[in-house]
Amino acid sequence: MGLRPSTVTGQSPHMVLGLESSCDETAAAIVVRHADGRGEVLSNVVRSQIDEHRAYGGVVPELAARAHVVHMDHIISRALDEAGVSLGDLDGIAATAGPGLIGGVLVGLTIGKALSAATGKPLIAVNHLEGHALTARLTDGVNFPYLMLLVSGGHTQFVLVEGVGRYKKLGGTIDDALGEAFDKVAKMLGLGYPGGPEVERQAMGGDAARFDFPKPLLGEDRLDFSFSGLKTAVRLAAERVAPVSDQDIADVCASFQATVAEIIARRSAQALEVLQANNKALVIAGGVAANKAIGSALREVAQEAGARLVVPPPALCTDNGVMVAWAGLERLALGHVDGLDFTARARWPLDSDDMRVRHG
Ligand code: KG4
Ligand code: ZN
C-alpha cells in the first residue's frame, strides 16, 4: 500500500502485530511505521463471522467469542507468514481492549497478553475507536486536527481528533447505530443480513420521494442522532402498504436511505464548523461508509465547506487488525505501552479521562 508521511519524525522504524476481536471479525495484521512516520501494511488477515450469525439476523455475542477462540491462532500465523516475519521481529503486540462485546475482546486481549509475556515485547492495549480514528493517518497521511464520522453497526459518532490520545466526542446516536438501523430495516422487509448492502441494492430501483420519513433531532442544535423513531416510521409505512410488493420494498429502502443520507449530511456540515476554515478534513470510518448515497451526500457537504473528504479503502473502514496495529504504532512512537494487568472493557468512550491519563 502506498502511504504518505504523517507528522512525527526522527524515530526508528517499528513493527507491530495488531489483533481485533471486539465484534464479528477475527483479525490480525502486521504493520510497520517507518522513521519518517510513513506506515506500511505487511499483512492484513480478516475472518468475518457473518455466516455464523446470519441465521440470527445479528451478531450473537457468545457465538462470536467462541469463534474468536477457534480462529485467532491461525489468523495470527497467517498474518506473520504473509508478512514474512516472526514474533521475534516485532516491536510490540497491540490488541483491542474495548469497547465491544466483552467475550470477544477478552479473547484477543488475552492472546495479546500471552504473546507479550512469551516474547517480552510490549503490550499496547488499543481502544477500538482509536483504531478507526487514526486509520486515515496511515492511509492518507492526514494531519491533526480533523473530524471523524464513525458509522458502523455498533457506533455512530462525530469525534474531533486533535492528536494521539486527544479526542473529543462532539455527538453521537442516542439509540441505534446507523448500521444497526439499516440491518433492522432490512430484517423487517425480509431482506438478508447484513442489511446495509441489501437496502442499498433495493434502493437503486426505488422512488426516494414516495415516503416522507421523519428526521429525528435534526431541528435541534446538537450533533446527535436518533434512528429508532425513523425505524418505527419505516415499519409503520411497510405495514400500511402490506402485503408489500417488490416495488414497495424498493421505495421504502430508497426513501429510508435518502432520509439517513440527508440526516448524516446536514449533521456533518454542522460538525465541520468546529474546524478552522482553512484546515478542514472529514474522515469517514465504519462499514456504512460503503454506502454510495451517503458517500455522495458527504462529498457535496465537504465541497461546500471547503473540506478534504477522506474515505479509507473499504477493507480499512470496517473492522480489521491493521487499524489496531497502526494505533499501537502511533502510541508506541510516543512511548505509551500498557501493563499485562490491563482490563478488557465493554464500554470505553474515546474522550474519557482514562484516555487522557493514558496518553499524557
Ligand atoms: O464497521 P462494520 O463492518 O462492523 C461493525 O459494525 O463493527 O459495519 C457493519 C455495518 C452493518 O450494520 C452493515 O449493514 C453496514 O455496516 N453496512 C452498510 C453498507 N455496507 C455495510 N450500510 C449501508 N450501506 C452499505 N452499503
Ligand atoms: Zn469498528
Image (spheres, rainbow, N blue to C red):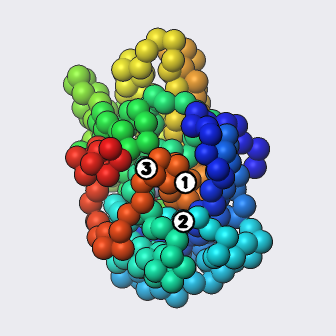
- From this view, report whether residue 252 is shown above or below residue 300: below
Element type at mark 2? strand
Pinpoint residue 99: horizontal percent, then vertical percent.
34, 61
Q: Which residue is mark 3?
A: 130
Check contact, mark 2 vs mark 3: CB within 8 A. no
Q: Which residue is mark 2?
A: 92
Check contact, mark 1 vs mark 2: CB within 8 A. yes
Give whichever of 210, 294 is nearer the camera: 294
Residue displayed at 62% across by 68% down: 90
Element type at mark 1? helix
Give whichever of 290, 32 is nearer the camera: 32
Q: Amino acid at mark 2?
A: Gly
Quick check: 247 left or right of 96? right
The span from disc 1 to disc 2 (Cα, nearest Å) is 8 Å
Residue displayed at 37% across by 25% down: 271
- From this view, report whether residue 321 is shown above or below residue 210: below
Q: Amino acid at mark 3?
A: Glu
Pinpoint residue 300: horizontal percent, then vertical percent.
56, 21
Which is more N-terminal, label 1 or label 3?
3
Quick check: 332 left or right of 229? right
What's the mark number on residue 329? Answer: 1
Pinpoint residue 198: horizontal percent, then vertical percent.
56, 56
Which is more N-terminal, label 2 or label 1?
2
The part of the image, by quadrant, that contains residue 329 is: bottom right
The part of the image, by quadrant, that contains residue 293 is: top right
